[in-house]
Image (cartoon, rainbow, N blue to C red):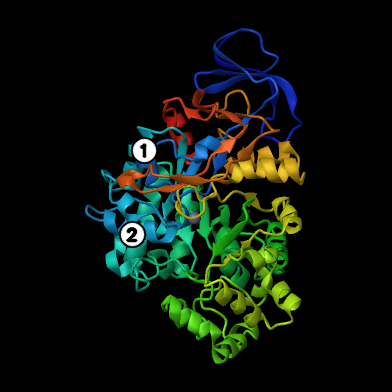
């Protein structure tokens, strides 16, 4: 047989979880044609001796809605072996949009996902409806892109500025349902919601999705039930699920898969994951598809007390944080101020309104970069350890150091997923899905586009918490399946030839650096990996040894209903 592309002598990991084997993968017309010891000629042969060949990774939680319009490769995800991304998460999207409505939708996206507004202002909006947006993307894609219908965009389209301020009327809900129906019929993969109460617009008002009551959410979900297709994604679903099982009820009522953010280890609530797992176990046992996502990435924040917002909202601390530096130093020296701070935050009588820290904050903040040579020995010590070693109170130990080093001591705050033993349990939890790269979001702060290489290097190779086959299954088949993508995520004859080829012994994320490559000259953090040799999309090489080939083989991914209909009609 003659192939377009033949990958020879690889260790084949097919995405099903089955053991790896030595073999070849043949590709024809953008699809996998054969797997095994293959004979025959090919237009192009890749010798993958010593490398692993797997399905391309499916990155299900991205915010490339704007970026994809100027960067059809969706960097940096594609460099990490990702061949499909799903956008429109957490209720945020750039369609539907009224003529002239670009600014407002961009503001939601910019403020919630920390994408510079000057970058979003450069987008050329030539679409109004979701099907038009999907058709626009379909003309020029490097990776495949699946779309979720963003509740915030839909609500704003229907209700305008009143989408932030009141419940929707029956007519407005009906108009929203019609938009959802039209988008699902055109192949959108599902609906996305937000339950993150801290998601504000630049004016400090909660984004439209957060103004919807349960009736509205269930009415929109009902369209997916009516059409029998589509997934429901919810940013910040954990809290309402724990409170009154909103995610489970939504899945039970609609019969659709619900995926929500997130299952994690929270340093400020170290036992929380156990309670959440118990709830998810119960849900799964009763036959309901409401599952959390879990990220392999740890979240830590570096800060100094010169610019920190960590204690924002604590009554005595708040005004000090926004005061001038000399006033900060004066306050931090003042024994009365220290007494009040101790009362409010050590005795925990006035917890911060924006809880980056919990009552055990003195264990989850540690000295990262001391300034003075004599304090170098403090590096890696938590504030509690500092206090104990010096025989001082927590606030005295903390602020003595801050004052002595003129506010410049570098601290590190543990936020999420920082306990490796617990993370091994969460990542192996069968009722959660691994993902949450947030690709395209908070481009200047922290990225997570390396979640796949992080999983394969740190968790699989270094810590050995799961087999390579299992990790690949999570990144491919499981991720594709849960979002209703049934023609990808496995190396199987007849399925799309989305392929990653990498060296399991060297694959790893590299340290990030700054790059000025965004429109309008803005910068972002660049996150590249090592060890990924090829990213192949629909049978064409997209990235070869870290360099884009210039090919644009990506497609818009459409749901099962769309495929069934178009196949029936031909
Ligand atoms: Zn998100």
Q: Secondary structure at mark 2?
A: helix
C-alpha span from label 1 to label 2: 21 Å
Residue 161, percent from left and from top? 28, 67
| Residue tagged 1 | 137
Q: Which residue is mark 2?
A: 107
In percent of the image, x 35 and y 51: which residue is there?
Answer: 94
Q: Which mark is residue 446?
A: none
Give the residue at the far bottom of this rendering. 336
Q: Callout 2: 10 Å neighbours few (<14), some, many (20+)? A: many
Label 1 beta carbon less than 8 Å to ligand 1 = no
Above or below, comparing residue 249 to residue 2 in the picture = below
Task: Compare residues 165 and 341 and report the one nearer the observer.
Answer: 341
Residue occupying image coordinates x 74% and y 58% = 422
| Rendered position, 429 above or below 457 | below
Residue 362 place in picture, x, y as percent? 66, 74
Q: Nearer the viewer, residue 30 or 264?
A: 264
Q: Quadrant of residue 281?
A: bottom right
Q: Nearer the viewer, mark 1 or mark 2?
A: 2
Q: Are marks 1 and 2 in contact (CB under 8 Å)?
A: no
Asked whether mark 2 and ligand 1 are closer than 8 Å, the reply comes as no
For marks 1 and 2, the one nearer the N-term is 2
Q: Is residue 176 visible?
A: no
Total number of numbered discs in the rendering: 2
Q: Position of residue 181 (x, y in %)?
A: 39, 50
Near mark 1 (Cα within 10 A), the count class, few <14, some 14-19 or many ≥20, is: some
Percent across and percent down for residue 312 are: 50, 76
Q: Residue at x 50, y 80 (%)?
A: 329
Which image quadrant: the C terminus?
top left
Q: Is residue 225 visible?
A: yes
Looking at the rendered structure, the secondary structure element under dot 1 is: helix
């Amino acid at each position: 047989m003659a192939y377009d592309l033949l990958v020879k002598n690889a260790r084949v990991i097919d995405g099903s979880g089955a053991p790896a084997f030595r073999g070849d993968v043949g590709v024809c017309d953008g699809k996998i044609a054969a797997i095994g010891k293959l004979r025959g000629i090919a237009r192009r042969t890749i010798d993958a001796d010593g490398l692993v060949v797997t399905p391309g990774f499916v990155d299900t939680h991205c915010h490339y809605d704007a970026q994809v319009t100027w960067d059809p490769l969706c960097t940096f995800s594609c460099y990490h072996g990702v061949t499909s991304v799903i956008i429109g998460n957490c209720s945020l999207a750039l369609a539907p949009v009224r003529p002239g409505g670009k600014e407002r939708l961009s503001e939601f996206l910019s403020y919630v996902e920390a994408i510079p507004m000057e970058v979003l202002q450069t987008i050329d909006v030539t679409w109004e409806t979701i099907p038009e947006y999907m058709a626009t993307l379909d003309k020029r894609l490097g990776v495949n892109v699946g779309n979720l219908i963003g509740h915030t965009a839909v609500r704003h389209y229907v209700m305008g500025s009143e989408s932030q301020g009141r419940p929707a009327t029956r007519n407005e809900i009906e108009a929203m349902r019609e938009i959802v129906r039209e988008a699902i019929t055109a192949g959108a993969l599902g609906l996305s919601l937000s339950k993150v109460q801290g998601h504000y617009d630049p004016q400090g008002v909660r984004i439209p999705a957060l103004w919807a009551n349960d009736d509205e959410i269930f009415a929109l979900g009902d369209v997916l039930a009516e059409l029998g297709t589509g997934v429901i994604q919810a940013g910040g679903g954990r809290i309402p699920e724990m409170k009154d099982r909103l995610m489970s009820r939504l899945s039970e009522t609609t019969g659709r898969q619900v995926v929500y953010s997130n299952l994690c280890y929270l340093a400020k609530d170290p036992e929380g994951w156990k309670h959440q797992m118990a709830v998810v176990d119960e849900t799964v046992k009763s036959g309901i598809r409401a599952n959390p996502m879990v990220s392999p990435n740890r979240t830590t924040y570096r800060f100094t007390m010169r610019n920190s917002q960590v204690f924002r909202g604590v009554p005595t601390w708040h005004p000090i944080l926004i005061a001038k530096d000399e006033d900060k130093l004066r306050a931090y020296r003042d024994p009365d101020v220290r007494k009040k701070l101790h009362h409010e935050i050590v005795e925990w009588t006035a917890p911060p309104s924006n809880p980056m820290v919990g009552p055990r904050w003195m264990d989850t903040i540690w000295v990262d970069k001391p300034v003075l040579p004599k304090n170098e020995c403090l590096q890696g010590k938590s504030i509690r350890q500092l206090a104990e070693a010096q025989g001082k109170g927590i606030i005295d130990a903390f602020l003595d150091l801050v004052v002595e080093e003129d506010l410049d001591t570098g601290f590190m705050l543990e936020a999420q997923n920082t306990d490796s033993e617990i993370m091994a349990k969460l990542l192996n939890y069968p009722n959660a899905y691994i993902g949450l790269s947030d690709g395209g979001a908070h481009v200047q702060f922290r990225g997570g586009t390396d979640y796949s290489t992080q999983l394969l290097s740190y968790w699989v190779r270094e810590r050995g918490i799961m087999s390579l086959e299992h990790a690949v299954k999570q990144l491919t088949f499981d991720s594709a399946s849960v979002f209703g993508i049934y023609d990808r995520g496995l190396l199987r004859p007849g399925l799309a030839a989305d392929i990653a080829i990498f060296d399991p012994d060297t694959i790893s994320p590299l340290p990030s650096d700054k790059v000025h490559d965004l429109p309008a000259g803005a910068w972002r953090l660049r996150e590249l990996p090592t060890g990924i040799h090829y990213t192949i999309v629909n049978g064409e090489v997209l990235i070869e040894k870290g360099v884009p080939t210039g090919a644009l083989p990506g497609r818009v991914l459409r749901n099962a209903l769309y495929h069934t209909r178009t196949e029936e009609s031909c």
